[in-house]
Amino acid sequence: MKAKVHVSLKSGVLDPQGKAIANALHTLGFPNVGDVRQGKLIELQIAETDPAKARAAIEEMCKKLLANPVMESYSIELVG
Amino acid sequence: MKAKVHVSLKSGVLDPQGKAIANALHTLGFPNVGDVRQGKLIELQIAETDPAKARAAIEEMCKKLLANPVMESYSIELVG
């Protein structure tokens, strides 16, 4: 089973990388770009056929390694 | 209009960061994790109401700044 985990900074948290991208885009001639936020997208393969169990395992992985729950939020999407 | 741009390494390209995540997950007690790939997810706000124009502008941004077309592929998703 394949899963996509999207990790992004919580909305209150300052995102300097996103700000840098926004500034660069303005400089490159895209003045109509507003707020930019950069997150991570982790695609993983898990040897588990039960979607509920797969989701629970990935939730655990997010808490232990993939995301920093203090500053980041995550969402899990199971793909086929 | 809001857009999500997903930038990931092309499939033939070695992803050391993904490999490191996979190894760490194995060590943490998730032996059933297979291949892991890490990409970027950039969320941006664009002051453009025409979806076709917004998509064209973002395509341009990807080529100029957001992705490295030699090694990375990208997909654009317009959200509302």
Image (tube, coloured by chain):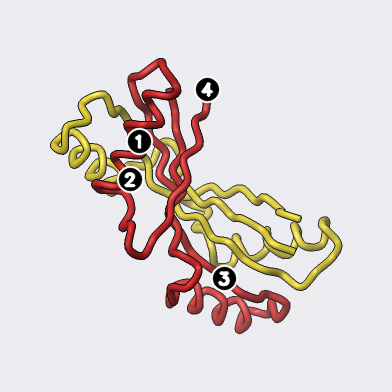
Chain colours: A red, B yellow
When the figure is inspected, residue B12 is found, relative to residue B48, above or below; the finding is: above
Q: Are marks 3 and 4 on the same chain?
A: yes
Q: Earlier in the sequence, mark 1 or mark 4?
A: 1
Q: Residue at x 49, y 58 (%)?
A: B68
Residue A70 placement: quadrant: bottom left
Closest to the camera, between mark 3 and mark 2, is 2
When the figure is inspected, residue B38 is found, relative to residue B27, above or below; the finding is: below
- How busy is the neighbourhood of tag 3: few (under 14 within 10 Å), some, or many (20 plus)? many
User: Tags 1 and 2 in contact by the CB under 8 Å rule?
Assistant: yes
Q: Which residue is mark 3?
A: A36
Q: Residue at x 55, y 67 (%)?
A: B65
**Between marks 3 and 2, how big is the CA–CA gap?**
23 Å
- The kind of residue tagged 4 is Gly
Q: Which residue is mark 2?
A: A62
Secondary structure under the numbered disc 2 in the rendered image: helix
Chain of the residue that carries numbered disc 1 in the rendered image = A
- How busy is the neighbourhood of tag 1: few (under 14 within 10 Å), some, or many (20 plus)? many
Closest to the camera, between mark 1 and mark 4, is 1
